[in-house]
Amino acid sequence: MKEACIQLLALLLIIHQAVALENRACEALRCDFVCDCTDCSDEQDCGYRGTEFVCDFEDAGMCGWTDRSTYAGYQWERRQRGAQLPSSGPTSDYTIGTSTGWFMGVTEVKADSLRAAVLTSPVISQSAHTCRLHLYYFIWDSGYTGLGDSFLWVSVQQLDGQHAVVWRPESTSIRAWREATIFLGRIPGPFQIELHSHREEGRRGDIAIDQLEFLDCALPVSSGSGVCGKDDLKCKRGGCVEQRAVCDGTDDCGDVTDELNCGQYLSCDFETDLCGWTLGSFSSLKWIRTNQMNVTTSEPLRGPGRDHTNNSALGHFLYVTKPAVMNSDWASFQSPRLEQTNSTHPCRMVMYSHQFGGVSGGLSVLVAEKEIYPVWQRGGSLGDLWVKAEVEFVVNSTFQIMFVAAIRDQAYGGIAVDDIWLSPECRLSNESMPRPTFPKPPKHPCTEDSKICDFLRDCTDGEDESQCGDFSYEQGSTGWTDMSIGSQGWKLNSEPNDISTEVFLYVTGAPGQQLTEAQTRTPLLGPSGPSCTLQFSYSITGSNPHTGELSVAVVDSVLGTLPRLWEFSGRTGQNTSLWEKEELYIGARVHRFQLEFRARAQDLATDTRIAVKDVFYINCPPQYLPSTSDGLSCNFESGLCGWYQDQTDNYDWTVQNGNDHTIGIGRSLAVDMWNSTLRGLSGRLLSLPQFTVTEHCLYFFYKLYGPQTGALSVKIKHEDGAEELLWTRVGAHGNIWQEGHCSVRSQLTEYQLVFEAVRSGFDGQVAVDDVAFVERSCSLPTMCSFEGSNCGYSSSGAAKWILQNWDFTRTGPVTDHSLETTRGYYMLAHSGVEVLPEGSVMTLTSPLGHNVAFTECVRFWYHTGGDNPGTLSVYVKPLKGVKNKLFSSSLSQGDVWRLGMSNISSTENWQLQFEVTGAGGKDTYIAIDDIIISSHSCPSTGEICDLERGLCEWTNTQNPDLDLLDWELSSLLFETHYPTPPYDHTLGNERGHFLFLPHTLRDTAGQNAWLLSPHLPSTKGTCLRFWVHQPVADDSMLMVWRLSKGNKHKVLSLTHAGQTWQSFRITITSDEEYQIVFEGFKGANGVLALDDFGYTVGINCVGEQTDLTTSPSPDHTGGIVAAVLVTIILATAACGLVVYYLKKRAISQEPSRIETSHTGFTNELYDSGDMDAHVTVPSISEQVQEEET
């Protein structure tokens, strides 16, 4: 027993010591990018969270970032996009890519002088020289007020209070998230990061950031053994650095161990003087020794922002930029004279350059001895960072090192040099030197710069295209320039084999300090044509299965670096003689651009190789247009025909196999809005340029499918770049192909047609198929929303119908019916006496409709305004014969859109006529929207909607203030993406249709969808019937409402209906006109579905007639005797109940029913055990309270 107690005490002592050690460890340095605590709590809210050092702003704490703006009218805010597609700011966050994701954006500002918004990080302890901050940023001047010069920039504030500018993005305005890396570098003490935006005027969210990630910011740590490699240096604080990093002007260890014993080196940090370097130059443009404080502290675009030595605005460097008057475009400085060297003991130079902005044309290092010749060069702009370079000199006579900068006449930028270190082998010389001769200037180009590398041979020998990166030219491979800033770079290799000399680009070690990808670029290319393709072969070999990554990107001269076109990760094998061939679509690009290969090897071991060869540009001249036998007509079974992907949009259309319109198992083009990798607003298909002097019609089939699917539009793009909307649809249209067409008037200039998918929703699919472009007028469209065009409808009579929206005119309905926004269009008839005298008529006439052998249904929505607005009559007019009235209404029916419909049967071709007769009212109007022609008869009042022919009279609202999703129409047979019920209720098989809200991987769980009935008359008892499939309890939810004058009154709340379809019958009473609302809330795990729903106006759920005189709904045709209507309803209801009962018995036997009676409704449902726990109905007192509120 005593021994056991001793063992227990010893165990407790060990635990106590472990806890004490843990507590001491957690008292270590906070926010230093090292998790000292086991739960990494010491690295929480440091501007990042967790072991990944990421901040996505999804947490309300914002990772410790705070707004420190000094002006209340302009600040940073954590926000979401919102339910409705905004007119400014991002269309989604970057991290999640939907409207529910969070990001940081600026507020709206409108002031008479610059206002500053500042977002500040917590205090960070220190950072390593490799530290960088990767983020996504958004810059869009949606109000076209101008961005200015300081719209977004990042600085670092250290303990001395000085701000060092560390990042300034390109000023291009694009509605898209862009990727950037901020190189923070070595900061030895506590600091804060500040994001600044200075603007006088701008709209909300137009400057934004998201998804911050700190990379390689921790100082070196000791290996597990504590032993460094053979040639490595051990740091005093622990950790190891490579020998090449010793005495290079950078504190790699974090305690300057690697920079202590460097007395034999000739180094210059320019803090006090030039160290013997001279700034004299034959050019009128001179280098200067300066610091950022002397350049500017108020203009972020000027100067490098900081020196390299101290990473501070106070530190000095050499600098050259564009002068006020540019008489020369180059400047030089040179070293003292140096002794000759040899290949066994070369003079080694390490130096750091900052090449930023368009002004930076490039930096070269030359040797001046008897002649002057180049030994190293780096062209263009490298970004907002100091880049390390190494140059070796083997010179057999006294020489000088010369730096030459090339300066361009651009808006901003410059070139700086700092921390030049010469190895001990570089010895000063007292010997004199002969005056060196300058090299011959390069041969003058055979053509102007804009024509070099434009895919067209402008010179007789093709010299202008010979060094552009295309390997089909002998010198083509030399057109690729290494732009690497890190420890890996690209080189050109000539490797002899048995047959020939194989030329390829490969990744090798480089002197740069950053742990970034190797980058190699072409010169500026293009513009390119719609068939342009990049062809190349690649090889990634090594013993490691994950040898490395290779990707291709486009750097646009205006838009900057675009998202990657292609990526490969892993390895192609272990045999270096085997190559994989790849073709990438480059497409039509209107700006000059560069192609870029990026690569990063996991480890540059002896057997590791990442290589690229046989790079060819295929069909890239802008004048090259592919020949297509069918023009723009295309079923997409074997290509895109006369269509191609727009390269200025955010994502591409993709080929979808199966479930197409043409043959059912073929191909169509689609955009999957549910694709979690999509970012940005739109994906566009462009036609080849067209020139038509006669009217044409564009026919096509389309899908808009899913609970949050976005929009599809057709536009015409004119030669001057202006675009005109021809047709648009938005919201769920069912998992079925719909027919669309739009008229294209004769054009005097060349134009292009555009299919545009708009990602306003994030859970659905947009698709097109079977496009035809024919020379004739369009026939009567089956659906016309008047968005962008009048669909061929023409106006005649005493006044004109006008195509308009509220935003532009401030008259008529405030919102349209299609989009339910102030920007949506409709046709308006001003029926006031000041426009349309009493008794006068104005007529809206449709294009020609063709006679068919069956009855069709015309549905439309109309809106009346003012007292005594006149009479709306709808006629069908055969080509021969007398017109027949289909509908008539002369009532002022409130500020709502109402449904009208009627059957059409004609043995001849016909036209619709919407006729308004003035009644003498003042400032009155009648509007028409959403005219739909269906290939079946109209549903009769009281008919159950089985969804086999659409939604009947019911509609999905598009009002973002009411819902965020749509009820989707589908069937099991054609459903390939979403989970569904195992069968519908009507047919009881996979072919039958239903409405449903599925659970999906998108973050829309808990969001709602409204399905609305037409407006129904007041009633003492109308029976609502519907069937529900809701197998998962407490997941999704169904609410049934009675909606009157904008007020909701609860009828039913349901959270579980069981594993099979369940029936519900509810008697609704209302003292005023109302609508029925099915509001579904999407679940996270289960599906919610509706089928076979409808109502019997004036007849309750026990079959009693409750309304003695039942007026026809104001949404339907007037002038029918009430008694006849009641008789029809009773007969239909009786027959329907019998057929309904017999048909349902084949599916399942009904359990006993429970009937609950309440004032306002009754509820009849199947008993399924615990269903009462999942169904709530308001009591008498609850209903009174709801109606009072």
Image: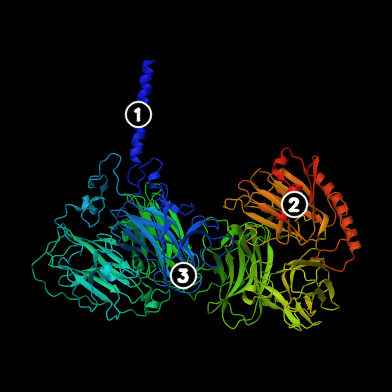
- Which of labels 2 and 1 is toward the front? 2
C-alpha distance separating marks 3 and 2: 55 Å
C-alpha distance separating marks 2 and 1: 68 Å
Observer-nearest residue: 304 or 580? 304
For label 3, count other residues whose C-alpha is less than 10 Å away and answer few (under 14), some (14-19) or many (20+): some
Question: Disc 1 or 3, which lies upstream in sequence?
Answer: 1
Q: Secondary structure at mark 1?
A: helix
Spot occupied by residue 838 in the image (x, y as percentages of width and height):
80, 82
Residue displayed at 73% across by 80% down: 795
Q: Secondary structure at mark 2?
A: helix
> Which residue carries the number 3 mark?
173
> Which residue carries the number 2 mark?
1184
Quadrant of the rendering where the N terminus is positioned: top left
Q: Is residue 964 left or right of residue 27?
A: right
Spot occupied by residue 146 in the image (x, y as percentages of width and height):
45, 74
Kind of residue at badge 3: Ser
The furthest residue to the top: 1
Observer-nearest residue: 992 or 182? 182
Observer-nearest residue: 329 or 1188? 1188
Kind of residue at badge 2: Val
Residue 399 location, quadrant: bottom left
Q: Is residue 626 left or right of residue 27?
A: right
Observer-nearest residue: 303 or 356? 303
> Which residue carries the number 1 mark?
14
Circles 1, 3 touching at the beta carbon (< 8 Å): no
Spot occupied by residue 208 in the image (x, y as percentages of width and height):
46, 62
Residue 211 location, quadrant: bottom left
For label 2, count other residues whose C-alpha is less than 10 Å away and answer few (under 14), some (14-19) or many (20+): some
